[in-house]
Amino acid sequence: MLLLLLVGIACAAGGYYIFYYKPQQDALALENMPVEEPPPPILEVEEEPVVEPAPPVTDYYVSPPKLGVRETPDEAAFIESVVYRGDKLHVLEKRDGWGRISPYYVYEEGGPEVAEWVPMSALLEVAPTITKQERTETVTTYIENSDDFKHHFEMFIQSTDQLLKEGTCTPEDFEETKGWIRSVTFEEVDAYFVYCGGLKQANKIYLNVRTGKIFYR
């Protein structure tokens, strides 16, 4: 009987432990277990677009009515040629306020390198707007020494501007001949002439100031 009693007590103790005590201890342990906070959300950072630097400006336009092109970046340097208002120039190099618009040249062995330079202060990044009055004043400077200039002013201006825009003549052509020269070749035609592109007969351009017709001999 005693043995059976002891076995019963042991079974009761085991049942108490399994079905009551251990579940309570497990529940208490869960209550005391630290609560793990969820990890913070990962924020996606948008990358800023890479802004490419603007390419350097190399094309410019002449601002003054006439601009001397010099062989070195110096106001006292020799003027090799002349450019005019609105002319487009490609600047290859900038130095101390000057722009180089041609390659370097050496005209004699052992001589210095020279190029064509213009002051950057005389150039614009955008082509200038030239009014009709400004255009007339500019063309006038090319031909104001023409024969009978005041008498045929409008016809000279109109014809000169036409030849310049067509590319038939350059301002230098008119400046070289001091403008239009009265022709004595034709008896019945009131004609004047100018040389464009050379001084040969083939380069001689005539203008009938009464009709405005431009012709060659």
Image (cartoon, rainbow, N blue to C red):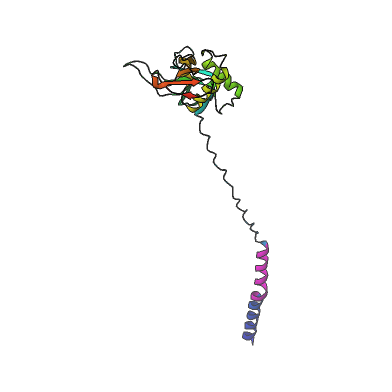
Magenta residues (range): 17-31
Identified at 68% across, 66% down, the residue is: 28
Identified at 56% across, 43% down, the residue is: 49
Q: How many marks?
A: 0
Side of 167 relative to 64 (left or right): left
Residue at the far bottom in the pictured view:
1
Side of 40 relative to 148 (left or right): right
Magenta span: helix, strand or loop, mainly? helix
Q: Where does residue 69 sit, x and y in percent of width and height?
A: 47, 18
Q: Where does residue 172 sit, x and y in percent of width and height?
A: 46, 18
| Residue 213 in view here | yes
Identified at 65% across, 74% down, the residue is: 17
Residue at the far front in the pictured view:
188
| Residue 64 in view here | no
Residue 29 falls within the magenta-colored stretch: yes
From the viewer's side, name the closer residue of 86 and 182: 182
Q: Where does residue 107 sit, x and y in percent of width and height?
A: 35, 17
Image quarter where the N terminus lies is bottom right
From the viewer's side, name the closer residue of 88 and 42: 88
Residue at the far left in the pictured view:
109
Residue 213 falls within the magenta-colored stretch: no
Q: Where does residue 20 sit, x and y in percent of width and height?
A: 68, 74
From the viewer's side, name the closer residue of 201 and 178: 201
Image quarter where the C terminus lies is top left
